[in-house]
Amino acid sequence: MIIKTKVPKKAFLKLLILLLLLQSCGKSGDGLISSALSSSEIDWISEKTQNLILYAPEDSYAAENLAELKIQAETARQQVMERLQVVKQEAAPSLLFLESREEMQEFTGIAAGGRTVVEENGAFFTMNDAVNPPLRHELGHLYSWRSWGPPAGYWLSEGVAVYAAGDCRGEDLHAWAAKLTSENKLQDFSLLEQDLDFSSAAAHLQAGSFVKYVMEKYGVRSFRLIWEEGLSASSDATGLEMDALLDQWTGHIMQKEFTAAAQFLDLDTKISCE
């Protein structure tokens, strides 16, 4: 006998969002890292640090600069761990450095500067003499997902990664958010929760500024409630209802120290915060 169970619409939507999140962050069970490392197309060399395992194609730019890269990766890891207050310790992540976005497309399915593969505890990076790997950004994705589980929305994951990377182009994330406000480019958070525009630097900067504000004013425990449940958990997380919390954040980013810096910033779609 076959028993059919109807899934409530809200539960179905939540499941669908979770599946999309897992796919976006590389947690899809596709063995991307193991497949890349076993590929006959690349002869890999590897080096271990105290907390990481780095892989680079033989004779690549990354391989030639592996000694310095090891230091950079360990420094990035320490910064991300401190910023996110991550305390979970586990096996060393695998960091794979490819030479071009074309190789990233071939091995990960996306032509990006980086891709985190949560399920395999690792990440891919593009690195050459013109491109620096977004170490803190991808490690921000990796450590948050593996320590806290999947978020309520991808905007939170991206916001954490932007926050983990620190200031953007040498300016505070709140200054960038103030610039967005002055140019009427802040997005309604209800839309941000529904669908993060990956092509929009504005959406990433907005998410990063909000995450920074909640993390630094209310602490990681409060932020994790929002990470797990979304903005609907604002009251439990901060004591403020969602609209009041967003108004508080807006008031903070419009302080003179941020608006003064914002007037000199140049918004474009290619802003990279690593």
Image: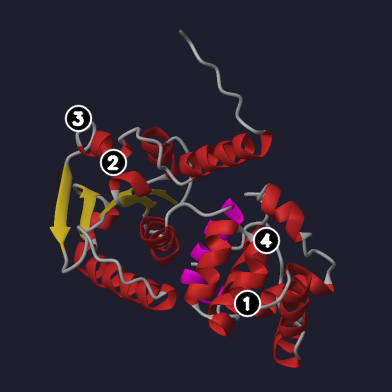
Q: Give the image location of residue 180, x and y in percent.
A: 76, 70
Q: Residues within 10 Å of mark 4 (few under 14, many from 20)?
A: few
Marks 3 and 4 close (CB-CB < 8 Å): no
Marks 4 and 2 close (CB-CB < 8 Å): no
- Lower position in the chain sequence, tag 1 or tag 4: 4
Is label 1 or label 3 in front? Answer: 1
- Res 272 seen here: no
Residue in front for this viewpoint, 232 or 189: 232
Which residue is labeled 3 in the image? Answer: 40
Q: Give the image location of residue 118, x and y in percent.
A: 36, 49
- Lower position in the chain sequence, tag 1 or tag 2: 2
**Residue at x 49% of width, y 63% of height:** 161
Q: Give the image location of residue 256, x and y in percent.
A: 76, 92
Which residue is labeled 4 in the image? Answer: 232
Q: Residues within 10 Å of mark 1 (few under 14, many from 20)?
A: some
Q: Give the image location of residue 207, x and y in percent.
A: 63, 64
Q: Secondary structure at mark 4?
A: helix
Q: Measured along the vertical axis of the image, is residue 225 above or below residue 13?
A: below
Q: Measured along the vertical axis of the image, is residue 18 above or below residue 269?
A: above
Residue 109 lies left or right of residue 228; in this view the side is: left
Q: Which residues are magenta?
A: 153-169
Marks 3 and 2 close (CB-CB < 8 Å): no
Which residue is labeled 1 in the image? Answer: 238
Q: Measure the alpha-carbon separation of dots 4 and 2.
A: 36 Å
Q: Measure the alpha-carbon separation of dots 3 and 4.
A: 49 Å
Q: Secondary structure at mark 1?
A: helix
- Lower position in the chain sequence, tag 1 or tag 3: 3
Q: Amino acid at mark 4?
A: Ser
Q: Amino acid at mark 1?
A: Thr
Q: Measure the alpha-carbon separation of dots 1 and 4.
A: 11 Å
